[in-house]
Image (tube, rainbow, N blue to C red):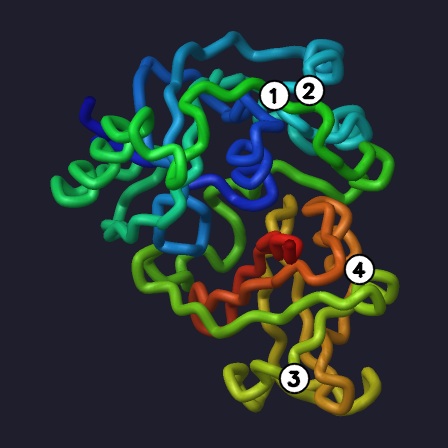
Amino acid sequence: MTVTRGLIIADPWIGHILDGRKDWEMRSQATSVRGWFGLIRKGSGTVVGLARLVDCGRALDQAEMIANFDHHRIPVDMIRRGEIAKWVVPWKLANVISLARPVQYEHKAGAVTWVTLSPDVSQKLSGYIALQDQSNDMLPPPSRSIDHSKPLSTASDQAGDAVRRTAAGAGKASQLPEGKHKVLGQSVLSGGNIRNNHIKLSPLMHAFPREVIGGSNKAEAAPRDLTIDWGGPETAKTDIDGTKSIFRARGWVRRFFATSGARENDVVIFTETGPYRISVRLERRKPEL
């Protein structure tokens, strides 16, 4: 079995797929592609999983979207507000595999929907499929059903949840190619962080440009803002409060926590995707035995 292509999916959606909670990837157009493909976590430059595209449904109306929440995980209030009216075509997935070791790939300029993988990457991914029955310690079972018992934020909690921004988003041209993104660092969440909607930046303040770091109030705001891709319908813009080492604007942080189901000791990963642009994603901290 050969895996020649990959699909870029943002958090939290790719996390829901890998965790077995989502088996419909909602897109704006139908596809004739079928078979295995790589799951690429947006902003990571890596293939983090594999899935088999088994079918492509027709565009769904609002009532059908609401009725199929368990498949796509898009909050009901978002659907009713029309925020995802463009993304209503279900690409139906099966046999999801979460890779124990993500595989790096080269993102060539011009790749829009499907990313063509190099022969080397294709060979590595095909090897995972061939070994899935022999490597239980490395890979989960090849066939996974939607697990509705796993905890999720409720639809009302996820009012700010979103699918993904359109390809013509403002400032898109300034982003670096996917393969040249740079991980800046990480921050471990405390209970206080989650309750107060902030992320501790002190471990990686050195990684941010000086011109995005301001004082303790809006009157002392930095001369430049960061553009932050947190997985929502729109990016957020904010500078950093240098006295507290947190982002000054925190509305998007609250929505990011709600969307991703953030818990104490989870880790937020910061990746530079272009000049004054970063993406954030959440990684689960496995409980100690």
User: Mark 2: few, some, or many residues within 10 Å (few <14, many ≥20)?
Assistant: some
Whole-percent x, y for residue 174 in the image: 41, 63
Q: Earlier in the sequence, mark 3 or mark 2?
A: 2
Q: Earlier in the sequence, mark 1 or mark 2?
A: 2
Whole-percent x, y for residue 223 in the image: 64, 86
Question: Which residue is labeled 4 in the image?
Answer: 251
Q: CA distance from mark 1 to mark 3?
A: 38 Å
Q: Residue at x 70, y 23 (%)?
A: 148
Disc number lying in front (4 or 1): 1
Helix, strand or loop for disc 2: helix
* Amino acid carrying mark 2 in the image: Asp
Q: Earlier in the sequence, mark 3 or mark 4?
A: 3
Question: Which residue is labeled 2 in the image?
Answer: 70
* Amino acid carrying mark 3 in the image: Ser
Helix, strand or loop for disc 1: loop
Question: Which residue is labeled 3 in the image?
Answer: 202
Task: Please identify the residue farthest to the left as the structure is shown.
Answer: 119
Q: Is residue 148 left or right of residue 273?
A: right
Q: CA distance from mark 3 to mark 2?
A: 38 Å
Disc number lying in front (1 or 2): 1
How many numbered marks appear? Answer: 4
Q: Residue at x 61, y 36 (%)?
A: 163
Q: Are marks 1 and 3 in contact (CB under 8 Å)?
A: no
Question: Which residue is labeled 1 in the image?
Answer: 146
Let me know if residue 2 appears in the view.
Answer: yes
